Image (cartoon, helix red, strand yellow):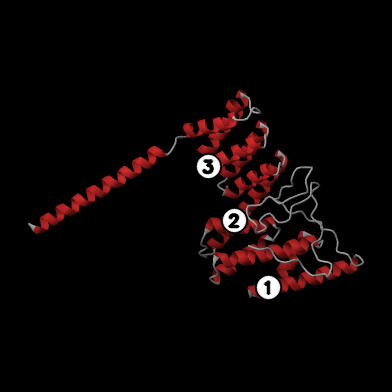
């Protein structure tokens, strides 16, 4: 009898627990607005601007916004872009093209968080449609390369944790022109040595610093790649390799100064993934975080900023986290 009573109590407890969970799930689902309800909210935001006619709202923008939501772009992210476009009085046809670029990235299975940040900050800086789409394309290409580097490491049997975060770290460094092979080496070596994501991120930022400094000193992408390659080939210790890159870079800068009569050669490389401000403002970086994700911002003519070495010849401080 006692055993039967215990069984009955357990069964009743399970039934009650299931009922509570079912009610909670149902309540949550009931509160989640449908795509049509979300579109209605977005339509109201668009309606707050006289710049968007009914045709542009209903025939140009809303169908594209529906695609974004259906592809998995969150409502909050979509809403933020719409609010920024209205605030900056962005042309509806330009926004459609920007949405198309975002959709293309999403359909490729790439992470879109950093892409969305680029769009919002581009709008905030009054960047043109062409500039924003150019940055989206460059960012998407770097994300694609980063995913390939990650997959290559995993195919070799390495257990790389934090996939999305690691892709972001690698893409940031690629944006700063760190050679692909150097990042592949870093990921594989760092993972094999048991380094954390934070440690790999710190080393990645250091490599970005060296790459930016090298580019500002006039080294071509081929010269930078060779500099990194030699440092990696001459040591297996990560800290020592960074020291070797620093030494090699100092030697290259010294040679460059000698060849040009005491001045550093102008940079001939371009760092992708950055957006200038409007034509009336000086260029400014449009990045996700203050970790130099986008590197130095290019000028409107596509050139790089002036060399950042100090009058005493000392290198500038490395990027902060």
Give residue 301's position: percent from left, percent from top: 81, 47
Front residue of 79 and 142: 79
Q: Is residue 114 above or below residue 255?
A: above
Q: Residue at 55% across / 57% down in the picture? A: 165
Q: Quadrant of residue 175?
A: bottom right
Instruction: From the image, state whether disc 1 or disc 3 is nearer to you.
Output: 3
Residue 118 visible in the shown view:
yes
Mark 3 highlights which residue? Answer: 76
Q: How many marks?
A: 3
Front residue of 227 and 211: 211
Mark 1 highlights which residue? Answer: 241
Mark 2 highlights which residue? Answer: 168
Find numbered disc 3 in the image and state the secondary structure of the residue it sits on: helix
Measure the alpha-carbon separation of dots 1 and 3. Answer: 43 Å
Front residue of 130 and 310: 310
Measure the alpha-carbon separation of dots 2 and 3. Answer: 21 Å
Can you name the residue that lies furthest to the left here? 1
Q: Earlier in the sequence, mark 2 or mark 3?
A: 3
Residue 219 visible in the shown view:
no
């Amino acid at each position: 009898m006692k055993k039967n009573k215990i069984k009955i109590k357990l069964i009743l407890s399970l039934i009650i627990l299931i009922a509570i969970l079912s009610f909670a799930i149902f309540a949550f689902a009931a509160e989640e607005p449908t795509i049509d309800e979300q579109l209605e909210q977005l339509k109201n935001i668009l309606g707050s601007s006289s710049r968007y006619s009914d045709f542009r709202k209903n025939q140009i923008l809303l169908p594209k916004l529906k695609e974004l939501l259906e592809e998995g772009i969150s409502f909050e992210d979509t809403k933020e872009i719409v609010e920024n476009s209205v605030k900056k009085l962005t042309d509806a046809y330009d926004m459609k093209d920007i949405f198309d670029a975002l959709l293309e990235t999403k359909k490729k299975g790439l992470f879109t968080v950093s892409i969305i940040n680029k769009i919002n900050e581009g709008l905030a800086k009054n960047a043109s449609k062409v500039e924003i789409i150019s940055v989206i394309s460059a960012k998407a290409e770097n994300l694609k390369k980063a995913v390939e580097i990650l997959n290559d490491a995993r195919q070799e049997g390495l257990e790389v944790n934090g996939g999305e975060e690691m892709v972001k770290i690698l893409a940031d460094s690629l944006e700063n022109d760190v050679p692909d092979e150097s990042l592949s080496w870093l990921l594989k070596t760092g993972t094999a040595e048991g380094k954390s994501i934070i440690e790999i991120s710190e080393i990645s930022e250091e490599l970005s610093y060296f790459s930016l400094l090298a580019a500002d000193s006039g080294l071509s992408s081929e010269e930078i790649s060779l500099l990194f390659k030699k440092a990696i080939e001459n040591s297996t210790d990560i800290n020592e390799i960074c020291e070797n890159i620093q030494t090699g870079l100092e030697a290259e800068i010294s040679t460059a100064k000698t060849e040009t009569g005491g001045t550093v050669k102008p940079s001939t490389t371009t760092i992708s993934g950055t957006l200038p401000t409007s034509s009336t403002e000086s260029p400014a970086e449009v990045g996700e975080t203050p970790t130099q994700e986008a590197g130095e911002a290019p000028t409107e003519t596509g050139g790089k900023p002036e060399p950042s070495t100090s009058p005493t010849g000392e290198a500038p401080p490395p990027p902060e986290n």
